[in-house]
Image (tube, rainbow, N blue to C red):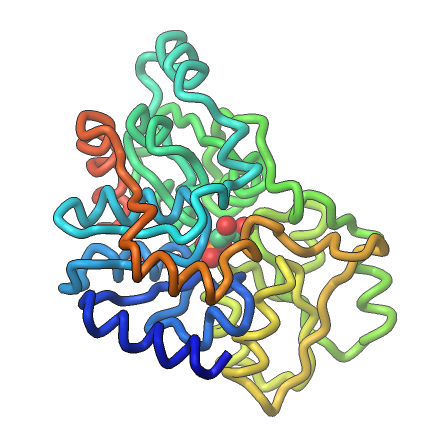
Amino acid sequence: MQELIKEIGQLKKERQAIVLAHNYEPPEIQEIADITGDSLGLSVDAARLDHPVIVFCGVRFMAESAAILAPDKKVILPRLECGCGLADMAKAADLRKMRRERPAAVVVTYVNSSAEVKAESDICCTSGNAVNVVKSIPAGQEIIFVPDRNLGAYVQEKTGREMILWDGACPIHDAIRAADIIKAKDAHPKALLMVHPECRPEVIKLADGVCSTGGMTDFVKQSTAKEFLVATEEGMLYPLRKAHPDRIFHPVAKDAPNAMICPDMKMISLADIHSSLEKMEPIITVNPEIADRARLALERMLAVPRN
Ligand code: 13P
């Protein structure tokens, strides 16, 4: 493994490449990454970095957003099959149909969506800025929120804005129930509960903090608590434990083994990164006409500050 890591380092230099990794990626991928973070942080970085080559370790919609925001760069996704069950729940044709039925509505689209769906949208958001994105829309304006109904419900509650919610959800977060939380709280009564806003309203109601993955690290930094329950994909435990070795983190586990693991986030291996840097493939391409429209929605999102 050490030899592979050394060679990746050399290839990165030769190709003038930078490696970005999402917080859910396996530890060895996060360790070799130049930057790790949440969806919002990684989008901001993709847009601002000077490197001509970005190796994106995450899932397809994230690499697509990077390619759209940095059209002059080569964005490599080491495994093209890394998808997102939530993103697959919204199709561009269905959103076009909904827009035709409600021509006055503003469409706010969560970045966990395809480039085609973003192209049909007015503004994007991540879990890190969704509340502020919706607050930025003039009062009284009808809003369609796509595709995560749980994040949409949370934003409705925080902003007091009624929205038309698309009927989608992340299969991992949506599987957590209030009963799982109560069990975890009983086992660790002193722990504070951090919940990702893709969780169900019944779970969010029990939270001490509702945060994007990046927001969880900040929540811990600002807290004096020693113990935390973490209601999100289990990969997040690694950066939390690394950033805060003096604290204790417990996953909110489902009884089924691996229930809190997103298989798409675990596909990329060090060997894949090595091979993609060597061959300079697979490169993410987005139809330029779709990319131009999706870029508008993404750039509007980047102009809005974090929640
Ligand atoms: P974050 O934006 O919080 O990193 O979340 C990404 C994601 O896909 C959650 O399932």
- Where residue 258 appears, as percent x and y from the top left, is 74, 56
Above or below, 75 relative to 182: above
Q: Residue at x 42, y 40 (%)?
A: 110
Q: Nearer the viewer, residue 227 or 40?
A: 40
The image quarter containing residue 171 is top right
107 sits left or right of 52 in the view: right
Give the residue drawn at x 27%, y 51%.
75
- Which quarter of the image is occupied by the C terminus? bottom left
For the question of whether residue 296 can be seen, the reply is yes
In the image, is 270 to the left or to the right of 142? Answer: right
Frontmost residue, 55 versus 183: 55
Residue drawn at point x = 54 percent, y = 43 percent: 151
Q: Residue at x 73, y 45 (%)?
A: 175
Residue 287, given in percent of the width and then of the height, sits at 23, 28
* In this view, 250 is above or below 257: below
Q: Position of residue 306 (x, y in %)?
A: 35, 58
Q: Position of residue 301 (x, y in %)?
A: 28, 45
Residue 189 sits in quarter: bottom right
